[in-house]
Image (spheres, rainbow, N blue to C red):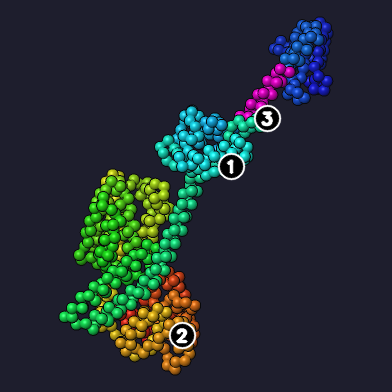
Amino acid sequence: TARVLQEGGQLILREAGQPSDALIPFGDTGRLSASLIFVPIRHSDRINGVLSIQSYTPQAYDRSDLDTVQALADHCGGALERLRIEEALRESQAQLARTEAVSLVMTAHVGLDDRWLKVPPMLCRLLDYGEEELLRMRLDDVIHPEDLESGATQRRRLVQGEARSFDLEMRCLTRAGRTIWMYLNCSVVQDVHGRPLYFLAYLRDITDRKSLEDQLRQAQKMEAVGQLAGGIAHDFNNLLTAILGHGELLLAEIGPEDPRRADVTEITRAAHRAAALTRQLLAFSRKQVLQPRVINLNAVVNDLAAMLRRIIGEHVSLELLPDSSLGYVYADAGQLEQVITNLIVNARDAMPQGGTLTLRTANVHRHESPDWEGRDHLVGGALVALSVTDTGIGMDDWILAHLFEPFFTTKELGRGTGLGLATVYGIVRQSGGQIQVRSQLNVGSTFTVYLPQVQGADLPGAQTETPGNSPGGPETILVVEDEESVRTLTCRVLRAKGYRVLEAPTAQAALDFLRDDSEKIDLLLTDVVMPQIGGPALAERCVREQPGLRVLYMSGYAEEAIERQAALTGGSSLLEKPFTADQLARGVREALSAGSR
């Protein structure tokens, strides 16, 4: 074999009976081969192996036999080379398929007549077509009609030699008509003479990315709407404060028999309704002031009733079943409005063909509710329950297990972010409550919110002072408000209560008062958002000048108030706009009384 590799073909002939220790016994008999031919298996300049034939007969071969065997070996060499290339090609194709599966990039060939010539399995699965089906179709059969012209124009440019390749984001349609977004990189394959043969297309599914981009754009739109809502609410709440305050002052001066009293009463009622509308607007933009207080869920439901009926549409019947003896809870009314609205919208979406939506409130005992940590402190174990029941499609156990996870949604693409119920769960838990879900497929679902019931002297009905009877005092109050109508009303109400009032339209004017006034100031009543120097920065300077100064903030734009809560000066509190004259007087009295404890 070594001689063959070095010198080429070898013809070895032995005489009969001639011993040869160099020869190897051949076969089971152990007989020695007398005639042998060894030739290299060649392909071009490459040797792939050695071919040998042997005979027990002396002088069995001659030179012509050697040439014949060499020709056979060369033929085998060509065949082996083709096998090696085919195997390498198969491995390359398998490697390409594995790479496509990992990288999510698909390679396809498309004819110049736009017919599919080669389609990857992944594309068949995405479009829900068999390979043979897709090969009988044209490219335009699976492209969204709105994207046909742009793709055809780019392919014509490739054929005409105006471009070497192009990139395009386009929509494809599955067998069921569902839209899939594809990223396409396309070039044209040419023959040795430069004539185009077919299109080489690299495809990648970008549906998830496009969905995230759409959600981001929607979130940015909602953020812009929220910013706009907050800005409008800031100015609108100032106007409502002036309307409510002056309306109350007029009511105090007009007797019960005066015919004008009914008109003024309607003005104040309309202002109160406008204030409620502003709070709902801020709740949707998540910029409401987070002020938990003792409230009745029936009142929250009644305030929302008209809006809820518009939300659910005419195909769904809304039933309100409030418990007339419902207890009170300690929570943020704006957040509870958000909870109720999200549950109502979720129930509506579960009834696309219509149905009945029932909202019920009730008093329950803790043994009637789901178990949760930290409820042993509840007085008497009393709870307030709010339930939303629909007659919709229901949910299976798998959906129930993931229901409150952020970004989990069963809605079709573009109809939900999966944050609604996650937000509901977070608000309920932050309010010290729990939420329970019961559902049955094709029957409906019930979401029940349980909140601790509050009892004792803090209930609204247990307060001793009545509206219009809020106390005043002789203290000195520095009022800082850039909105003239609100500042004028505020000062008028406080002076009527006996307070000494200093009036400042800007923070700088307030600082001048603080330096020039010989008397001590007992309370700083300031707006949160003002030009140049805001309320918190002003309060910080004033407290440095007069340690122990009490601070009461006014805010009609909740976002600023929320952002500054952590940095509010010690001994400060917050009065939400719009406020009535009575609420103003009570807030001032409570702030001053807190400083004397």
Q: Residues within 10 Å of mark 2 (few under 14, many from 20)?
A: few
- Number of the front mark, 1 or 2: 1
On residue 509, which mark appears?
2
Q: Mark 1 points at which residue?
A: 166
Q: Position of residue 11 (x, y in %)?
A: 81, 13
Q: Who is closer to the viewer here, 461 or 364?
A: 461
For label 2, the SS is: helix
Residue with the most extreme bottom position: 518
Residue occupying image coordinates x 27% and y 81%: 249
Local SS, label 1:
strand
Q: Quadrant of residue 483?
A: bottom left
Q: What residue type is labelled 2?
A: Ala
Measured along the vertical axis of the image, is residue 249 above or below residue 141?
A: below
Front tag of 2 and 3: 3
Residue 290: x, y in percent?
38, 69
362 relative to 8 in the view: left or right: left
- What is the CA distance from the residue labelled 1 to the residue labelled 3? 22 Å
* Residue 17 belongs to the span the image colors magenta: no
| Crowd rating for badge 3 (residues with CA inside 10 Å; few <14, some 14–19, many 20+) | few
Q: What residue type is labelled 3?
A: Val
Reading the image, the residue beneath label 3 is: 192
Magenta residues: mostly which secondary structure? helix
